[in-house]
Image (cartoon, grey):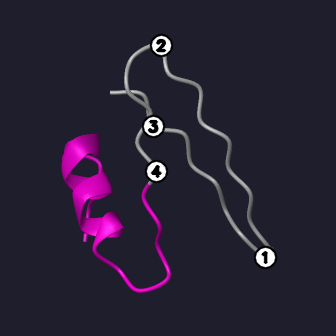
């Protein structure tokens, strides 16, 4: 499966539905603190 042609917003939408995924949304000009107990992978998607 080639994911290169799938828009980032669609990938994020799908990932956010998965078990073990927590979605935090920062509105424009809003700071968000994230605290996690690892192991974790943190993706920052600016769209």
Q: Measure the C-alpha gap from mark 2 to mark 4.
A: 14 Å
* Label 3 – label 4 distance at C-alpha: 11 Å
Circles 3 and 4, Cβ within 8 Å, touching? The answer is no
The local crowd at label 1, few if under 14, some if 14 to 19, many if 20 or more residues have their Cα within 10 Å, is: few
Q: Earlier in the sequence, mark 1 or mark 3?
A: 1
Task: Mark 2 and mark 1 in contact? Answer it, CB < 8 Å.
Answer: no
Q: Earlier in the sequence, mark 2 or mark 1?
A: 2
Q: Residue at x 47, y 13 (%)?
A: 29
Q: Which residue is mark 3?
A: 45
- Decide: marks 1, 4 in contact (CB < 8 A)? no
Query: What element does badge 3 sit on?
Result: loop
Q: Which mark is residue 29?
A: 2
What span is colored magenta in the figure?
1-23
Q: Secondary structure at mark 1?
A: loop
Question: Furthest residue to the bottom?
Answer: 19
Rate crowding at label 3 as few (under 14), some (14 to 19) or many (20 or more) other CA atoms within 10 Å: few
Front tag of 3 and 4: 4
Q: Is residue 30 magenta?
A: no
In the depicted view, which residue is nearer to us: 7 or 28? 28
Apparent side of residue 2 relative to residue 36 in the rendered image (left or right): left
Disc 2 from disc 3: Cα separation: 15 Å
**Can you tell which mark lies on residue 39?**
1
Which secondary structure is most common in the magenta stretch? loop
Bin the neighbour count of mark 2 within 10 Å (Cα to Cα): few under 14, some 14-19, many 20 and up.
few
Q: Residue at x 67, y 62 (%)?
A: 41
Instruction: Single out the mark in the foreground, 1 or 4.
Output: 4
The answer, for residue 6, to whether it is visible in the render is no
Circle 4 residue:
24
């Amino acid at each position: 499966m080639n994911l290169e042609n799938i828009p980032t917003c669609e990938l994020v939408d799908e990932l956010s539905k998965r078990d073990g995924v927590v979605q935090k949304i920062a509105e424009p000009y809003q700071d968000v603190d994230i605290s996690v107990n690892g192991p974790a992978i943190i993706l920052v998607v600016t769209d």
